Amino acid sequence: MLLLLMSDTHLPTRARALPPQLLEQVPRADAVLHAGDWVDLATLDLLRSRARRLIGVHGNNDGPELRARLPEVARAELGGLRFGVVHETGPARGRERRCADRFPDLDVLVFGHSHIPWDSTADDRLRLLNPGSPTDRRRQPYRTYMTARVSAGRLTGVELHRLPGPG
């Protein structure tokens, strides 16, 4: 099972459109996970129309229309693993403990907000993944997204993808 992870697309305020390299991956993925800050409904509708399965949440920059269509926290079983998606997890310091305490029922938590890629494990149990942003790198050297594979109930092949060009 191939997963495509993204967050903080901020369209059209940070970019006019999703990068073509990212859009090409959408129909190939078994599931697309978006950790919030879409900003516009058009991006949600675009991903829903192209993705086999879309799991998304709203973020702090998402208005009432997106909040009405998306939860704050989403949960899904994918390939035998229990996934959660949330926008914000608080400061980096103490993140693993906070998330392990808040989400004792998950195997993987995908989050966003900081635009800073993150990959760690809490309590040798909960994998924490932040794909960064494909449109707004902020202080990071690259715009990014992630892919991952789930096989036989295990998360494998987690890869951070750097997008070319300005951002």
Image (cartoon, grey):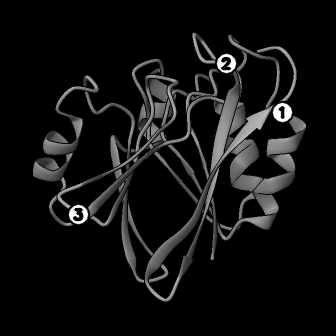
**Disc 1 target residue:** 19
Q: Nearer the viewer, residue 133 or 63?
A: 133
**Disc 2 target residue:** 141
Q: Is residue 124 left or right of residue 149?
A: left
Q: Nearer the viewer, residue 85 or 53?
A: 85
Q: Nearer the viewer, mark 1 or mark 3?
A: 3
Residue 66 x %, y %: 50, 32
Q: Is residue 113 left or right of residue 135?
A: left
Q: Disc 3 on helix, strand or loop?
A: loop
Mark 1 surroundings within 10 Å by alpha-carbon count, few (fewer than 14), some (14 through 19), many (20 or more):
some
Q: Earlier in the sequence, mark 2 or mark 1?
A: 1
**Disc 3 target residue:** 124
Residue 159 x %, y %: 63, 53
| Quadrant (top left/top right/bottom left/bottom right) for the C terminus | top right
Q: CA distance from mark 2 to mark 1?
A: 16 Å
Q: Disc 1 on helix, strand or loop?
A: loop
Q: The residue under label 3 is which amino acid type?
A: Asp
Q: The residue under label 2 is which amino acid type?
A: Pro
Q: Disc 2 on helix, strand or loop?
A: loop
Q: Quadrant of residue 154?
A: bottom left
Q: Is residue 123 left or right of residue 68?
A: left
